[in-house]
Image: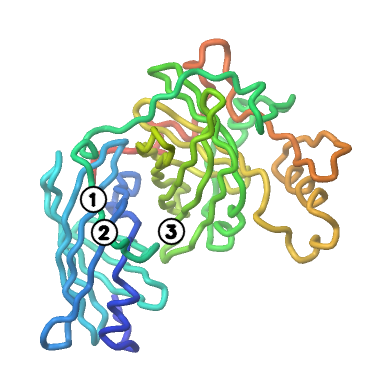
Amino acid sequence: MEAPTLQHSGREVVNKLTGIWSGWSQPVSRPEKRTLWERCSMDFTLNRSGKLLMVEGKGISVWRGCKTEFNLTGSLDLKTLTLDLSKQHTGKYTSSIRYKGTVDVNKATITGEYSRGVLHLKRTKALPSTSVSVSPSSRTKVSIKFSPVDTRNRKGWTPISATPISAERQRSSSGPPMITGVGFKRLDGIWEGESTNHTKKEVTVWKDCKLEFQFLQGNASFVKGTGVSIWRDREIPFSIEGTFDGKVGSGSLVKTHKGAKIRSSIAYAAAIDETQGRMYGRNEKSEFVLVRIKNPAPPPGLRTQGSRKYLVSGSRRLGIPHTPSTDRNASPNIPNPYSVDPTPQRVSRNPSYSIDNARFHSSSASG
């Protein structure tokens, strides 16, 4: 791995790198065994010699819906921008892993390796005024309890007659193709769908989920966004972040609710199909399906033609029938992403995205 040359002063590097980071680590031989790094704070300080930056931090490893705290220590060589980083788990798992990599100061990214795999991290924001804290309960499996809802008459969610999702998934049973940087950017926009908790037989709607994909090295992408969960006619805001590997079309997501009373998080192993504009996620108790319904803004060629025409063409590209409306500002109707019978636990599943399939699989923690 060739290291870049120094182009920044020590103080400038400290300012650009100190902050909250997100990303993932995974074994090369088993990329499905991915571990998501969540709420990872890293503080860089210049040592007395002025040649090294010392690194201290902490965060949470997310694996199969479980969270384990960890501490970070290390050093960054200011001349070569090479990083030596050690991660010590302090929760359910107590393993220690050492990473070596390089830092891109301008992009605020870390690309590294460890004995069995690779590491990709990206700085997402500056450190808050107070240090990042993790509650003791974060070391256990997390879930959010929702009561059953009838999504057929929910505000903002209008299912229509369309090809059954089970048949639609069968057509893509070979799995999605590799997603490139341009492909990830085409996934930016508004997504909607719903999740089902099979243990509790509970369903919740995901509304106005605005996602932004940031392409990293090695066909990987960091995704972040915000949205609203609809539950019992209540709207609960949430944030979402995670990573995807474009080579296999899979990754990890963490959804954090930010309501007045519900502020828990839930982690998913996820898969994405760029060609269908759909995203699937699952953990031990629940699963979700999201459909991309529109771009954040029309492309230049359609800006003067009105947003409605752009949304209609976008729906047709995804194979979603459009019902004409007299309302000039109306959005196209979106099909219910689940084929749910009267018993919510029996949800149609995609064979290519099965938890038992290598293209969409979550196993033991790796880093």
Q: Earlier in the sequence, mark 3 or mark 2?
A: 2
The foreground one among 104 and 9 is 9
Circle 2 residue:
130
Task: Tell me the element at label 2.
Answer: loop
**Residue at horizontal 19 percent and vertical 47 percent from the top:** 69
Is 232 drawn above or below residue 209 in the view shown?
above
**Residue 29 image offset from top left, x and y in percent:** 29, 51
Q: Earlier in the sequence, mark 3 or mark 1?
A: 1
Amino acid type of the residue tagged 2 in the rendering: Thr
In the picture provided, is 348 more to the left or to the right than 313?
A: left
Task: Determine which quarter of the picture holds residue 174.
Answer: top right
Amino acid type of the residue tagged 3 in the rendering: Ala
**Residue at horizontal 63 percent and vertical 42 percent from the top:** 276
**Residue depth check, mark 2 versus mark 1: number of the one nearer the observer:** 2
Residue at mark 3 to residue at mark 2: CA–CA distance: 31 Å
Task: Tell me the element at label 1.
Answer: loop
Residue that sits furthest to the top in the current view: 342
In the picture provided, is 172 more to the left or to the right than 316?
A: left
**Residue at horizontal 59 percent and vertical 32 percent from the top:** 169
Task: Tell me the element at label 3.
Answer: strand
Q: Which mark is residue 133?
A: 1
Circle 3 residue:
220
Is 269 drawn above or below residue 106 in the view shown?
above
**Residue depth check, mark 3 versus mark 2: number of the one nearer the observer:** 2
**Residue 293 image offset from top left, x and y in percent:** 66, 43
Q: Determine contact: label 2, label 1, CB under 8 Å.
A: yes
Total labels drawn: 3
Task: Determine which quarter of the picture holds residue 219.
Answer: bottom left
| Residue density around tag 3, few if under 14, some if 14–19, many if 20 or more, within 10 Å | many
